[in-house]
Each structure stands twice: as structure tokens, then as C-alpha cells.
Amino acid sequence: MIQEEQEISKKRRDEEAQAMCLWSIGEIYFELGEREEALQYFKEALDILKRIGAAEGIEEILKKINIIKGGDKEPEREKS
């Protein structure tokens, strides 16, 4: 479903939506522990976000890339 949305975004030339789809796919692979696959999608999304100047998204994706490249664990989330 996300990949279908990505294709639609490409056709519409909606780069922000395309980046978000790539990011989402990367998140899925990240959660599955397939870090190299996630890294590919994060890098594609990062390229688009840089091109459109989406600073907040860039920062978040760079955090994930850093976790993958550094082998660090994802920071613990606060329990509510």
C-alpha cells in the first residue's frame, strides 16, 4: 500500500509525499531489523527532503541513519 502511494506521488511529482512514503518504508524495515534495507530507503527520502528544504524531516532521518551506521540502539522511549 505504501509503495502504491509512492508510485502515485512520483506520477504527481509530489516530492514531499514521495519522501514520506520512502521514510515509512524505511521505518518498517528498521523495525523488522533489516537495517541495510532501511538505510537505502532513508537515504532516498533524505535526498528528496534536502532538495525540498524540509529541515525537520532531514533531522529525523539523519538520526535513524546515525543509529544504523553507528550500530547504536534506538533511544528508549518514555513510558507513559
Image (tube, rainbow, N blue to C red):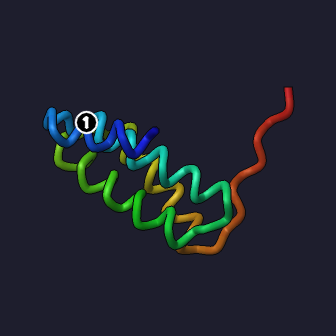
Q: Residue 60 at what x, y percent from top left? A: 47, 46
Q: Residue 69 at what x, y percent from top left? A: 53, 74
Numbered disc total:
1
Which residue is under mark 1?
8
Please indicate whether residue 18 sits to the left or right of residue 41 in the image: left
Residue neighbourhood size for the residue with mark 1, other residues' Cα within 10 Å, grouped as few (<14), some (14–19), many (≥20): some
Closer-to-camera residue (42/6): 6
Q: Quadrant of residue 17?
A: top left
Q: Which residue in the rendered view is the most extreme toward the top?
A: 80
Closer-to-camera residue (10/55): 10
6, above or below 34, in the image: above
Please indicate whether residue 13 sits to the left or right of residue 43 in the image: left
The type of residue carrying mark 1 is Ile
Q: Quadrant of residue 47?
A: bottom left
Q: Element under label 1?
A: helix
Please indicate whether residue 34 sits to the left or right of residue 58 in the image: right
Q: Residue at x 52, y 73 (%)?
A: 36
Please indicate whether residue 28 sits to the left or right of residue 77 in the image: left
